[in-house]
Image (cartoon, grey):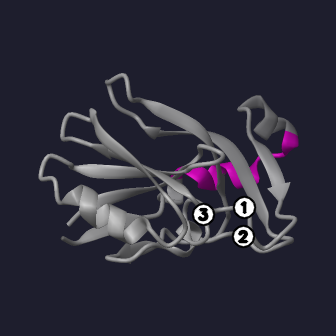
């Protein structure tokens, strides 16, 4: 079983970086500066920002579906980065983090879910996709609950 993990497209976020703090606050977003090399995971590059880098923290609908499983939460995005693509391996942003993997069918209904510890994501993804009814998996950071990335079956 092969899979791919794609970072979010940067296009919808580009206008946010031109907003001042008042403009960001008006849409419930904030400009933040990473205070460490870990803990500020960019959902476009699928890497943690480095200390001193600017990011936008905003509300994002990650599972925009017409089912009870529609989901939204806060995410970080960085300016000037491209959407990362990972095939058959997990991105750096998954490393060292416990994850919640939520497996959905073609109708966007949750079929099953799994909590995985650091280093366990790849095996769990492959195991979940062994079920042909699973169309895609949404990964979330288990502790904070924020969306990490969409995992697609190839």
From the top left corner, tell me how far across and down residue 44 is, in percent: 54, 63
Mark linked to residue 137: none
Relative depth, front residue between 90 and 75:
90
Q: Is residue 66 above or below residue 20?
A: above
Name the residue tied to disc 1: 40
Relative depth, front residue between 49 and 13:
49
Callout 2: SS: loop
Name the residue tied to disc 2: 49
Q: Are marks 1 and 2 in contact (CB under 8 Å)?
A: yes
- In space, the residues marked 1 and 2 are separated at their CA atoms by 5 Å
Q: Main secondary structure of the magenta part?
A: helix
From the top left corner, tell me how far across and down residue 82 is, in percent: 53, 71
Name the residue tied to disc 3: 97
Left or right: 49 with respect to 33? left
Callout 1: SS: loop
From the top left corner, tell me how far across and down residue 90 is, in percent: 44, 73
Query: Looking at the image, is mark 3 or mark 2 nearer the viewer?
Result: 3
Relative depth, front residue between 103 and 119:
119
Residue 38 within the segment the image draws in magenta = no
Region of the chain picked out in magenta, as a range: 12-21
Is residue 144 visible to us here?
Answer: yes
Kindly give the residue lying farthest to the left in the view shown: 132
Q: Residues within 10 Å of mark 3 (few under 14, many from 20)?
A: some
Is residue 46 visible to us here?
Answer: no
Q: Are marks 1 and 3 in contact (CB under 8 Å)?
A: no
Quarter-of-image position of residue 46: bottom right
- In space, the residues marked 1 and 3 are separated at their CA atoms by 12 Å
Left or right: 115 with respect to 127? right
Q: Residue at x 54, y 67 (%)?
A: 94
Residue 13 within the segment the image draws in magenta = yes
């Amino acid at each position: 079983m092969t899979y791919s993990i794609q970072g979010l497209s940067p296009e919808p976020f580009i206008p946010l970086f031109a907003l001042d703090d008042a403009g960001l606050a008006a849409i419930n977003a904030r400009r933040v500066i990473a205070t460490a090399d870990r803990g500020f995971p960019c959902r476009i590059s699928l890497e943690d920002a480095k200390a001193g880098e600017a990011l936008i923290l905003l509300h994002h609908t990650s599972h925009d579906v017409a089912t009870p499983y529609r989901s939204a939460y806060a995410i970080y995005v960085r300016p000037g980065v491209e959407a990362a693509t990972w095939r058959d391996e997990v991105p750096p942003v998954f490393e060292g983090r416990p994850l919640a993997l939520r497996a959905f069918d073609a109708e966007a209904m949750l079929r099953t879910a799994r909590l995985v510890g650091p280093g366990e994501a790849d095996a769990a993804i492959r195991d979940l996709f062994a079920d042909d009814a699973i169309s895609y998996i949404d990964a979330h950071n288990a502790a904070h609950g924020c969306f990490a990335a969409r995992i697609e079956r190839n």
